[in-house]
Amino acid sequence: MTHATILLVDDDTALLDALSEALRLRMDGIQIDTSETAVDALDRIRENDYDAIVSDIKMPGMDGLALLHEIRELRPATPTLMITGHGERDLAVQALRGGAYDFVQKPIDRDYFVASLERAIQLCRLDRQVEEQRLALERHARVLEHVDDGVFLVDDHGVIQHWNPAAEAITGISSDVALGRRAENTIPGWSMVAPLVPVADAPGPGSLEAKVLPIEVDGRELWLSISGVTFSDGIVYAFRSLTEERALDELKGEFIATVSHELRTPLAAIYGSAQTLLREDIELDETGQKRLLGVIAQETERLNRIADDILFANKLDSGQFALGENTFDLRTLAKNVCDELRACFAARDDISIHLSVPDALDSFVADSDKLRQVLINLIDNAVKYSPDGGRIEVAVEQRDGGVRISVRDQGLGIAPLEQRRIFGKFYRVDPELARGVGGTGLGLYICRELVRRMGGRLTVSSEEGKGSTFVVELPVEPVSSGERKAAVAQGL
Ligand code: ADP
């Protein structure tokens, strides 16, 4: 045993010398400090963390038992051997009860003494190693508490033994729920996902690339980039959420699909009309020519609207848009919008648009152009999504502190799950156009953004097959532009 440092305490200097000598001879590299009094010994113990201490029990002043008591307080992990006089069994028992590691009786059997001391030193070292490992583990655990990646440990029995706060934040599954439970009962779909997760034998360079896999927690789909490393008694998994990136990818995909679909329809109509006009083998009368030119004009107008919607949504998102503010009469605005749309949809004689407005309305301050845009969009949708016709009711009411404008139709209605999603960008309930109505899925997104920026809100209530009601609620007092900016910044 090398480099052990021990302290010998005895008032008998001759014994101290003899024991030191004997230990040096028998234990390689041992370092020995000596003290003739318990008080001096305590000073040394305070300064040095000995591998073991050997003390006589009977000493003048502070005796060995009192010293033992102090050592237990100061250095509880340091093993202490007590030397007792011949036949002093009671003292020896007291020493053991007081926490001594062992005792040796005088006259001292050197072999036994050395063997016991070696065991004591060994024990002390093992204790220290265990403590160091425990501290290192604690440190690692603390580090894991602060990493952004979700980390969890699944032991050989499939039970989750560690679940860090990032894992909790990403999945919404709390560590109280996860710890001590089988992974497959905690992480939805884990039994299917786990075999697909790449698991390396050792961490570091060359370990396997993480795989992006979906799990579904409480109806939310999460896309996790996840990989694992085998551990002495299990697998440590690390993951991060790619849900937003994935959603963005999907949005891009939806955007391209919607836009190309929406562009193709008017382009095909324009192309077809132009081709017919160009054909020399067909004689077209003036009415026929006008009809085809009308189609070209109308479809070009539609292309324009699509481009406008896309550009406007982009302007809203990039913060390049500021609302205006003017005083206007909401009664007149609502009447004009309804008249325009009645004219627009004159061909739809299965549809009727009704407006109810109070006789008198306070003059209103907002961005009248944008409010017009919102109403046109809502009524246009009401007509578009009423393929079997019906009554569309537009109602303006003055309410405490604001106005409420509702647009009610008797059309297709919207399923409960879809009601929140329709306000999302490019979201269309029926992208395959099963009911043959085109659109970009941007209208409601733009409407909600505009109303929000006016300090109000746009909501929907609907029943599938019965119809929908869209409601715009606006404060009468316009939000000053400063407040509005703050509201927008806070995402209100
Ligand atoms: P677009 O009409 O261009 O598709 P919107 O953002 O205006 O885009 O609407 C999104 C989706 O919401 C529509 O595709 C449609 O399915 C649904 N929707 C909007 N208004 C109504 C309505 N009044 N009745 C039924 N569904 C509607």
Image (spheres, grey):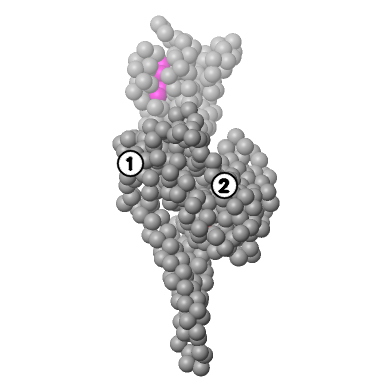
Q: Is residue 82 visible?
A: yes
Q: Which residues are magenta?
A: 6-11
Q: Callout 2, which amino acid?
A: His
Q: Residue 102, percent across and down?
A: 55, 23
Q: Residue 272, percent across and down?
A: 50, 81
Note whether 162 is above or below 67 in the view shown.
Answer: below
Note whether 440 is above or below 292 in the view shown.
Answer: above
Q: Residue 245, percent across and down?
A: 47, 56
Q: Badge 2: few (under 14), some or many (20 or more) residues near its Cα, within 10 Å?
A: some
Residue drawn where x is 47% and y is 92% of the image: 280
**For numbered disc 1, what is the local secondary structure?**
strand
- The one nearer the camera, 449 or 218, is 449
Q: Which residue is mark 2?
A: 354
Q: Residue 165, percent across and down?
A: 50, 39
Note whether 456 is above or below 63 in the view shown.
Answer: below
Q: Badge 1: few (under 14), some or many (20 or more) residues near its Cα, within 10 Å?
A: few
- Residue at the far top in the pictured view: 61
Q: Which residue is mark 1?
A: 326
| 2 or 1: tag closer to the N-terminus | 1
